[in-house]
Image: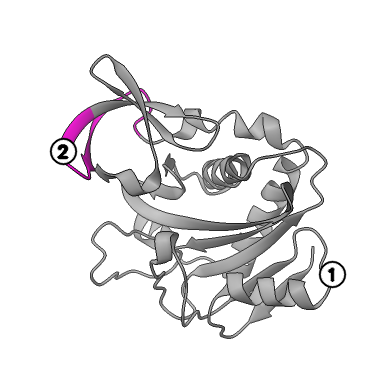
Amino acid sequence: MNIVKLHATTSTNDELKFRFRESALPHLTTIYSMEQTQGKGQQGASWASEKGKNLTFSVLIRDIQLEMTPFQINKVVSVSIVEWLKEELQIQAKIKWPNDILSVQHKLAGILIENSFSGSVFSHSVVGIGLNVNQEIFEGLPKAISLKNITGKDFNLEELLCSFLKVLKNNLCDPLRVAQYYNKHLFKYNQLTWFTSLHNDFEAVVKGTDKEGKLLLQVQNELLAFSLKELKWKY
């Protein structure tokens, strides 16, 4: 795998997209940086990370043999992180829809996937991942947690990165099989939980996702689909 280490960049996603526009890069080309000055999260949010403490990296996914939707790729990446945490680090985690990774109900990692198409045909994805590793204090982020917070141990960032990329590479060889485990790892799956919508707070049972990636909730006796902009979790 082609792994590029940077001391600093604005955003690993932006850096990888720029390099891909300039030259043909192979599948699973990865850029990781010790510091991001303009790290990005979902819906234009920023991703703050203490310099040199965490893993902030982006992976190019292309040349997948099977036809996949953007949300199926999201599923594979999310499941890969959760299974890697469990199998390699013995850390239990869940996927909080659509693509946050929680451990002990705190945010351990976030995913930002930017997809490109040639006409209506999927071309490639730039998968940005931020994993809290050795940072211990998260000012203004009471729901954040790191591997060190959980285990009390320091981790080698490059060893973690290579270990995860091996899991992702293997899972992308059979992505549809991996994607089917998304609900198994979904936060609050088949459980009653509270949400905030544009209009009110309500309780619902999490029933999975539809093909477009919307969250399926059973509200009383009705099954409803919600997009990311339509509701927030309360937990």
Numbered disc 2: secondary structure: strand
> Residue 178, position in %: x, y?
65, 34
Residue at numbered disc 2:
201
Count of numbered labels shown in the rendering:
2
State left or right for residue 21 relative to residue 210.
Answer: right
Q: Is residue 44 above or below residue 74?
A: below
Residue 234 occupies which quadrant of the picture?
top left
- Which one is nearer the viewer's eye here, 225 or 108? 225
Choose between 206 and 151: the one closer to the eye.
206
Name the side, left or right, on which 72 lies relative to 227.
right
The stretch of residues the image draws in magenta is 188-203
Judging depth in this view, the residue of 31 and 97 nearest the camera is 97
Q: Which residue is mark 1?
A: 24
Using residue 110 as the reference point, say whether residue 229 is left or right of it: left
Decide which of 217, 230 is in the foreground and name it.
230
211 on left or right of 170: left
Dividing the picture into quadrants, the one containing residue 164 is bottom right
